[in-house]
Amino acid sequence: DGGITQSPKYLFRKEGQNVTLSCEQNLNHDAMYWYRQDPGQGLRLIYYSQIVNDFQKGDIAEGYSVSREKKESFPLTVTSAQKNPTAFYLCASSIAPFRLGLDQPQHFGDGTRLSIL
Amino acid sequence: SQQGEEDPQALSIQEGENATMNCSYKTSINNLQWYRQNSGRGLVHLILIRSNEREKHSGRLRVTLDTSKKSSSLLITASRAADTASYFCATVLFSGGYNKLIFGAGTRLAVHP
């Protein structure tokens, strides 16, 4: 079955450590997204990628980095510069980059919960 | 302030009752989407309604859109315990040079057997 796979499900970060969250999709989607969700809140966009080898900062990109070397993969690194990384991280994809006038639902993985040790 | 805001924040009902959640937004939209999130899981797309549509149905879901009031509602009829989840509305906003999907904080629905 097609879908988005995020791993690991739970991740713990030590102070000063960088950690990488994996996101893989087999939906053949061009666009991929990373969101952060804090308790009781909606989703905030960290980074998005419209096509391979291209990505753009979202609203809260500071302290995060991404790469898009393959169409199916969009890993997110939470760097030591991110001082409050504890959150639920969600990866999503859509058929094409999100543009006005196009009806593009996003497909989500099951998330990675990151905590501080 | 958020582009989409759901109301109420939390809703508790008995199985068989109807559940209504509302979403208000601030700017003009092309479409509005509703998503569902089970606890500890990702979001699942439920339904999309375009700005030129007033009502849309999908199974036990009914979505309305009132662009003059900049609001939408999601009605779940004959609710079941399995409907327990958080429900989010999302709209497109052009900001910072790109289009992005803006999610509200969600309505937490609890359906009791």
Image (cartoon, grey):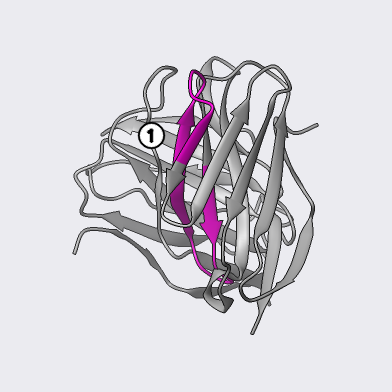
Q: Position of residue A43 (x, y in %)?
A: 62, 47
Q: From the viewer's perspective, is residue B81 above or below residue B72?
A: below
Residue B84, picture quadrant? bottom right
Using a 10 Å C-alpha cutoff, classify the residue at mark 1 as few (fewer than 14 neighbours), some (14 to 19) or many (20 or more): many
Q: Nearer the viewer, residue B97 or B94?
A: B94
Q: Residue B23, image x and y in percent?
A: 69, 39
Chain of the residue that carries numbered disc 1 in the rendered image: A
Is residue B106 toward the left or the right of residue A69 in the image? right
> B75 or A23: nearer the eye?
B75
* Residue drawn at x 41%, y 20% as measured from the top left: A99
Residue B100, magenta (yes or no): no
Tell me if residue B45 is in the magenta stretch. Answer: yes
Q: Is residue B40 visible?
A: yes
Q: Is residue B67 left or right of residue B53?
A: right
Label 1 sits on what residue type?
A: Ser
The answer to whether residue A62 of the structure is visible from this angle is no
**Quadrant in the rendering for residue A114:** bottom right
Q: In the displayed structure, would residue B39 be above or below residue A80?
A: below
Quadrant in which the C terminus of chain B appears: bottom right
Please give the range of residues in magenta: B34-56
* Residue at 50% over, 19% down: B30
Question: Mark 1 sits on what residue?
Answer: A49
The quarter of the rendered structure image containing the N terminus of chain B is: top right
Secondary structure found at label 1: strand
Which residue lies at the image location 60% right of the left edge and 46% below the top edge? B74
Magenta span main SS: strand
